[in-house]
Image (cartoon, rainbow, N blue to C red):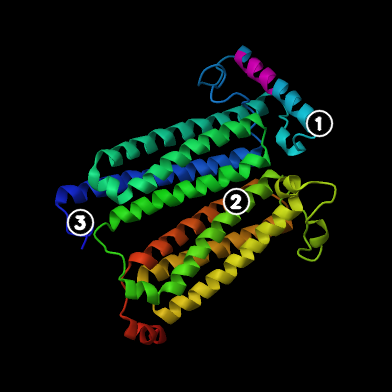
């Protein structure tokens, strides 16, 4: 038995519980930030502040009428710059964002983007504090040092991607990476939390892990496919055309590759390809989750794993309904935002199932089928 799985003094247990609590707060903040970011994208507010990381020459919004006129002038000049790049073929029309109706509308756009950046800074401070505590304690470093280091690196990457998005308008080249990176950060934070809460629980023995090999393989594939679906959703959102065809998949093949354009353009700017990929990834996830459900029933997987799997199926069902609603009614901000939120919940529930498949002890192999039959 390793030192990580031996009973620990109460002081160590309290420290782990405390860090897990703060990481729980960080996870909620990340969810909130992701939701705000989704609204920034859907409302077209992301281009309202063309400077990064400075805002209005400082870090505060304007407080006078003259200040508002100055930032509006800077916005107009940046739109002219982006429009010229669109004319030259360097960017797509979606990079221009939304044109405000009047000064009041521009102020709403500006404050929306400013709130997103402010909350991003708060998340960065919280993450830095948690990482500092983890790095100062040897027991915490050995337990969650690597995933927390990954969180820190990905948050820095997210900030850089945010700056690139500002420089390129709302470019699809960076938006889908921004979305996928956010999901990876939340997944790592959740992994740190469950490791802290179950630090005294040993991984399942090799024989049990071998018996669960199919379930572990399937849940791992589900995590990857769900993450890829979020990335594809970022491409769909970035191309500003979430419903290019309603008769899918019958009308799609001829437009999945637009002749006269290169590989890069089709992968990054072809809205038909993005939507086709997004929907087929969704069907792939349905098949994998169905196979995982059958495998977990046959193998008599333990209780927490089954609960996480049921949560994942619920989130997938709600996400599918929201996706259909988007196709039938057109892209509406509220439905699109809920669709993105459910996607994040789906990924995190699958991360929980993945952890429990490796760590939660279940019934002995001889009782697995009997327990499954009893259900």
Pointer 3 and pointer 1: residues touching (CB < 8 Å)? no
> Label 1: how many residues lie within 10 Å, few (<14), some (14-19) or many (20+)?
few
Whichever of callouts 2 and 1 sits on the residue coming sooner in the sequence is 1
Mark nearest the camera among 2 and 1 is 1
Query: 10 Å neighbourhood of mark 2: few (<14), some, or many (≥20)?
Result: many
Whole-angstrom CA distance, mark 3 to mark 1, is 62 Å
Q: Which residue is identified by label 1?
A: 88
Which residue is disc 2 drawn over? 231
Residue in the image at 29% along x and 42% along y: 134
Quadrant of the drawing holding the N terminus: bottom left
The answer to whether the residues at label 2 and label 1 have Cβ atoms under 8 Å apart is no
Q: Give the spatial CA distance, label 2 vs label 3.
A: 39 Å
Magenta: main secondary structure? helix
Q: Quadrant of the C terminus?
A: bottom left
Residue span colored magenta: 67-75
Residue found 34% across the figure and 52% down from its top: 193
- Which comes before the other along the chain, label 2 or label 3? 3
Q: Secondary structure at mark 2?
A: helix
Label count reads: 3
Q: Which residue is outermost to the left?
A: 9
Is residue 206 shown left or right of residue 235?
Answer: left
* Residue 112 seen in this snapshot: no
Where in the figure is residue 22, as x and y percent of width and height? 33, 43
Q: Residue at x 51, y 45 (%)?
A: 182
Which label sits on residue 3? 3
Secondary structure under the numbered disc 1 in the rendered image? loop
2 or 3: mark nearer the eye = 3
Name the spot of residue 277 as percent of width and height, x first. 68, 58
User: In the rendered image of this protein, does residue 297 appear above or below residue 78?
Assistant: below
Cβ–Cβ under 8 Å for marks 2 and 3: no
Q: Earlier in the sequence, mark 3 or mark 1?
A: 3
Secondary element at image label 3 = loop
């Amino acid at each position: 038995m390793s030192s990580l799985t031996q009973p620990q003094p109460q002081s160590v247990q309290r420290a782990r519980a405390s860090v897990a609590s703060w990481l729980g707060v960080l996870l909620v903040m990340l969810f909130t930030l992701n939701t705000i970011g989704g609204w920034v994208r859907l409302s077209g507010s992301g281009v309202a502040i063309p400077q990064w990381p400075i805002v209005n020459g400082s870090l505060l919004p304007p407080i006078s009428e003259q200040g508002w006129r100055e930032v509006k002038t800077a916005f107009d000049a940046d739109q002219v710059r982006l429009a010229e790049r669109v004319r030259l073929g360097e960017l797509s029309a979606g990079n221009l964002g939304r044109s405000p109706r009047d000064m009041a509308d521009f102020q709403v756009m500006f404050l929306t983007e400013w709130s997103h950046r402010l909350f991003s800074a708060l998340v960065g401070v919280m993450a830095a504090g948690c990482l500092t505590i983890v790095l100062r304690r040897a027991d915490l470093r050995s337990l969650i040092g690597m995933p927390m280091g990954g969180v820190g690196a990905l948050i820095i990457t997210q900030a850089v991607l945010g700056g690139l998005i500002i420089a390129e308008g709302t470019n699809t080249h960076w938006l889908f990476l921004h979305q996928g990176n956010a999901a990876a950060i939340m997944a790592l934070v959740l992994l740190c939390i469950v490791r802290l809460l179950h630090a005294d629980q040993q991984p399942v023995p090799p024989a049990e892990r071998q018996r669960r090999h199919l379930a572990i393989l399937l849940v791992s594939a589900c995590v990857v496919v769900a993450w890829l679906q979020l990335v594809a959703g970022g491409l769909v959102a970035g191309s500003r055309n979430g419903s290019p065809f309603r008769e899918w998949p019958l009308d799609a093949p001829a437009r999945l590759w637009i002749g006269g354009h290169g590989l890069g353009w089709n992968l990054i700017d072809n809205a038909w390809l993005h939507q086709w990929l997004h929907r087929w990834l969704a069907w792939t996830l349905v098949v994998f989750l169905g196979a995982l459900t059958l495998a977990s029933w046959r193998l008599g997987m333990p209780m927490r794993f089954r609960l996480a799997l049921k949560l994942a199926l619920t989130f997938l069902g709600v996400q599918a309904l929201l996706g259909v609603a988007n196709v039938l009614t057109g892209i509406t901000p509220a439905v699109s935002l809920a669709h993105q939120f459910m996607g994040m919940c789906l990924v995190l529930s699958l991360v929980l199932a993945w952890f429990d498949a490796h760590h939660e002890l279940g019934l002995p192999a001889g009782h697995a089928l009997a327990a499954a039959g009893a259900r």
